[in-house]
Amino acid sequence: MAQVNGNYLKLKAGYLFPEIARRVKAFSEANPRAAIIRLGIGDVTEPLPEACRTAMKTAVDAMGTREGFHGYGPEQGYLWLREAIARHDFQSRGCRITAEEIFVSDGSKCDSSNILDILGEGNRIAVTDPVYPVYVDSNVMAGRTGEADAAGQYGGLTYLPINAGNGFTARIPSEPVDLIYLCFPNNPTGAVATKEQLKAWVDYARAHDALILFDAAYEAFIQDPSLPHSIYEIEGARECAIEFRSFSKNAGFTGTRCALTVVPRGLMGTAANGEKVELWGLWNRRQCTKFNGVSYIVQRGAEAVYSPEGQAQVKGLIAFYMDNAAIIRRELSAAGLQVYGGEQAPYVWIKTPTGLDSWGFFDRLLNEAHVVGTPGSGFGAAGEGYFRLSAFNSRDNVIEAMGRITRALHG
Ligand code: MLT
């Protein structure tokens, strides 16, 4: 008889976004005429930049010729893309990251889960609460946690609460941990970290031989030039951090799929016998065995992000979504809600009105405003009493949604 992975049976609930989709489906079946506006899952809505489309069309045509055809590519990604990434995203900001240290992939959600393949079982793991659920669920699936308690917190994980009181940036843990997941700009709260705050994490990680898993999927939304975009802007981070990046949110690649993970050479982990092992070699081995790379066509599209036209078009997309975020912040504040985030990130984090918990507010907005958001409690126990709205939608829909929410709140 085929045994199942019992760790999956520990998972507390369905993955957050399918659960939202299930509730929305039930609502729209019961109310087929309701025009629902979706500000829930952070999925982009605006067309792919022209520079990317043109590059992909050229690549498709090349694939139709004997000379321009490409079969399996390098598992790590084509060198021309890795070089463009290293130069534009890292070296231009003073980070000593080389093309060799960049692994192109089909998504940072997958990479941030798959990285557990090369990490051991006994690590003490710290996550913020609330948190992007993938970090927690992938550890549960990999058997790196105990059971969940009544609040949905898993045994064996160190939860670092983030809330309005600490500016949604976690305090350095008082107990020693080996793995730390950080996400800045933060999903779901929209908070950002200063260089000083990241330095404190890097110092902690170096002092405790810990590894930081740094998710920078939303770095392009940072508006304040003094804020770091990469953990490698911090001295010493090469010795203690892996960084995840994505083309999903900046260039609209959520459906096209392209991302990258940076594993610096010389970044070491420890084997059971105490020997130091370079993580780069393990990740390279993992990718070569389990991954066949991103398609040539998509990588050419990603490369075009770094052309002058691509850069201008991506800037336009970011400005468009950040204007949406500003509208959400302004209108909801005017409606009397307490809002956070949305200034350096495409997510606005809202305190639910008195008397409504996260799912209660979700149901009220769905039923009365036909607007879908994401309940804060879906991101962890400390997200209870909060609600996330995404700025990824058309301008008309954002304005319409804000009007409807205001009317629903004030009758
Ligand atoms: C979100 O809504 O949190 C994001 O869409 C998740 C993701 O990028 O996987």
Image (spheres, helix red, strand yellow):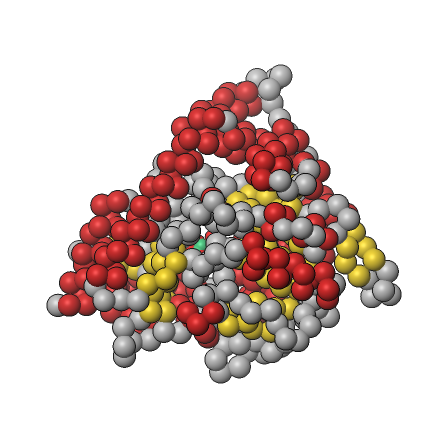
Q: Position of residue 280 (x, y in %)?
A: 74, 48
Instruction: Give me the residue at 40% from left, 32% from top.
Output: 313
Residue 300 lies left or right of residue 278; in this view the side is left
Identify the image quadrant of residue 403: bottom left
- Percent across and percent down for residue 170 are 53, 67
Could you tell me which residue is drawn at 87 percent across and 65 percent down?
Answer: 273
Rendered location of residue 53, percent (x, y): 44, 28
Asked if residue 62 shows in the view, the reply is yes
In which quadrant will I find the C terminus?
A: bottom left
Identify which residue is drawn at 68% across, 41% down. 96
At 53% from the left and 47% from the top, the residue drawn is: 229
Residue 408 falls in image quadrant: bottom left
Compare residues 118 and 9 and report the one nearer the observer: 118
Q: Quadrant of the N terminus?
A: bottom right
Q: Nearer the viewer, residue 52 or 190?
A: 190
Left or right: residue 164 compared with residue 281: left
> Can see residue 23?
no
Instruction: Tell me: residue 119, above or below residue 176.
Output: above
Q: Residue furthest bottom?
A: 150
| Label total for image | 0
